[in-house]
Amino acid sequence: MNENSELVVEALSEKFLAEHSREAARCLETLPALEAAEIISELGEPTRRQVWKAIGLAQCVAILPGLSDDVAKPILEEMDPGPASNLLGRFDETTRHHYLSLLRPGVAKELQSFLTYPANSAGQLMDAKVHTYRPSMTVTQALAYLRSRDQMIGHKLKVVDDNNLLIAHVDINAVILAEPNQTLGEIARPVSAVVRSLDPREEVVSKLEQFKLEEIPVVDANGSFLGVIRHPELIDALREQAIDTLQTMVGVSKDERATSSSWFAVRKRMPWLQVNLLTAFLAAAVVGIFEDTIASFTALAVLLPVVAGQSGNAGAQALAITMRGLALREISVRQWVRVTLKEINTGLWNGISIAITCGIGVYFWSGSVGLVIVIVSAMIIAMIMAGIAGALVPIALTRLGQDPAVASSIVLTTVTDIAGFMSFLGIATALSGML
């Protein structure tokens, strides 16, 4: 290392790196990639994780090959799936496969799914090998960085913040004409349009025509920059679409569509309908357990659908949000604890609110304080259980390789029915002396 690098290394003590990870990351970004990799390799695991999260994506791409496999493995496994897939997506297929092979099978499979975009989506069409820049970089630093990269630059430099969120772009002509000490933030311009990675090709075409763009940035569900789509890629995609259309006209397609044969649809759907029948018997069995309680207090039969219906609706809401998050890659199966805790908290407060309203109505209807206590308690428990089921069912099915869109509603209905029946009738049986 040169003298300047040695001074930087000396200044970046372990304490500084741990307590000021963002500032330390900015210093590391100014060093040659191999020297930065050497410093990162010498850090302790917690400090290394903090500093790595603060380093820009483009710099991570340059630094990662300089790390040993023993250092790279825990770094990639500790990263959230979105940033990790963004990072690996900027390497060629051979390098990407090498890093995936280092990881635990479950993590590698999850990242591979994040790296695979649906056909004809923006993510499939984009060029991910696009460098990003900080608003604090001077024109001199930006030009030096550009000269050190042997890749297509494009007409605009993409400016991102510390979280890799796309905040602006800088025309390359503006960089050439600007004063050397001006920052990119001073000459940057707002981004007029972006597309999300899962947006269909039609949305990309529409925005390119609407805003008269030569290229359009692609971001993920959280706004993190992924890459750009340029006109050549779009033209190639449209040519492929024309070929696919000709194939479809002569019946070459293998995917199920709305116009697929009934027999094909039956073969796909019938197994889950049979499962639904079995689970319906489970819910009925729960009611049968409390047959004597229902016979003694007929008001329970009247109120039983209220608890089951509310828990079913709450579960459906949690299910819809979770499935949307999985579909848009806002969450991954590894984040099941975070998602479940959020739905537990939501179910608790929604349950309390609904239980109060329900309790008031039941009291004016029946005049029984005991019945109010039963339905209030059952409503809260059922709403919490519904939230847990709505979060976990699609995540579990995804983890098992099943299609959550087909199976989740069947499993969820069973869980919410059993939770509603069991909580309501179980509490009623326990407090039968108050009814």
Image: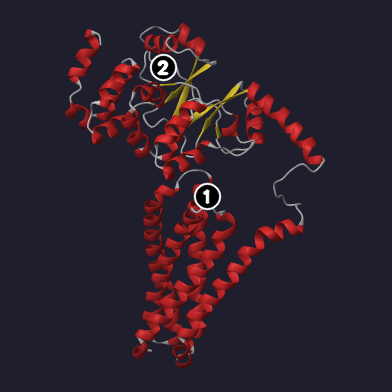
Q: Residue 278 at what x, y percent from top left? A: 57, 72
Quarter of the rendering occupied by the C terminus: bottom left
Mark linked to residue 184: 2
User: Is the C-beta separation of discs 2 and 1 under 8 Å?
Assistant: no
Residue 120 in the figure: left or right of residue 328: right
Q: Residue 225 at what x, y percent from top left? A: 47, 30
The mark closer to the camera, 2 or 1, is 1
Please tell me which of labels 2 and 1 falls first in the chain: 2
Quarter of the rendering occupied by the N terminus: top left
Q: Residue 98 at what x, y percent from top left? A: 44, 30
Write the residue at 47% across / 44% down. 330
Badge 2, how many Cα within 10 Å: few under 14, some, many 20+? many
Q: Secondary structure at mark 2?
A: helix
Mark linked to residue 324: 1
Badge 1, how many Cα within 10 Å: few under 14, some, many 20+? few
Looking at the rendering, which quadrant does residue 243 occupy? Answer: top right
Q: Residue 114 at what x, y percent from top left? A: 50, 39
**Residue 260 drawn above or below residue 206:** below
Q: Is residue 360 visible?
A: no
Q: Across the whole image, how many numbered discs are drawn on residues?
A: 2
**Residue 266 drawn above or below residue 154:** below
Write the residue at 69% across / 46% down. 255
Query: What scheme was used to colour the molecule?
Result: secondary structure
**Residue 432 drawn above or below residue 361:** below
Q: Nearer the viewer, residue 266 or 291?
A: 266
Amino acid type assigned to the residue bearing label 2 in the image: Leu
Write the residue at 48% across / 12% down. 150
Q: CA distance from mark 2 to mark 1?
A: 36 Å
Amino acid type assigned to the residue bearing label 1 in the image: Arg
Looking at the rendering, which quadrant does residue 160 occupy? Answer: top left
